[in-house]
Amino acid sequence: MAEEEGGVEEGDIFLAFAHGPTPPRGPLRRALDKIFLTFLVLFLTLLMLEAAYKLLWPLPWTKFRDWLLRTPEEESALEL
């Protein structure tokens, strides 16, 4: 059955994973990684805030002003 799969033996598969860990990155590369990740997070946050602003702006905010008490009549009815 090994001939049908291209002649890959079981030992060859284990050799592909036997390279060992990668060497640690230098301090400059780690600093650049942190700067890039910070930039990426800030950029995506600004994009999400802009999208939320564009979605929420057309809502009729005047209807939400008296949301808790609904109408001035109900407000006067609640006063003791």
Image (cartoon, rainbow, N blue to C red):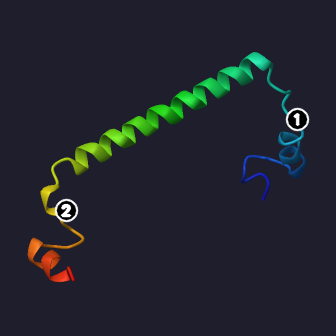
Q: Which mark is residue 51?
A: none
Q: Quadrant of the C terminus?
A: bottom left
Residue 38 is situated, as x and y percent measured from the top left of the image, at 58, 30
Label 2: which residue? 64
Label 1: which residue? 19
Q: Residue at x 53, y 27 (%)?
A: 39
Left or right: residue 80 compared with residue 49 = left
Residue 48 sits in which quadrant? top left
Examine the rendered structure and indicate whether residue 37 appears above or below residue 51. Answer: above
Depth check: 28 or 75 in front?
75
Left or right: residue 52 compared with residue 38 = left
Label 1 Cα crowd, 10 Å radius (few <14 / some 14-19 / many 20+): few
Q: Does the residue at mark 2 contact the one at mark 1 (Cβ under 8 Å)?
A: no
Residue 55 visible (yes or no) = yes
Residue 59 is situated, as x and y percent measured from the top left of the image, at 17, 54
Q: Residue at x 86, y 44 (%)?
A: 12
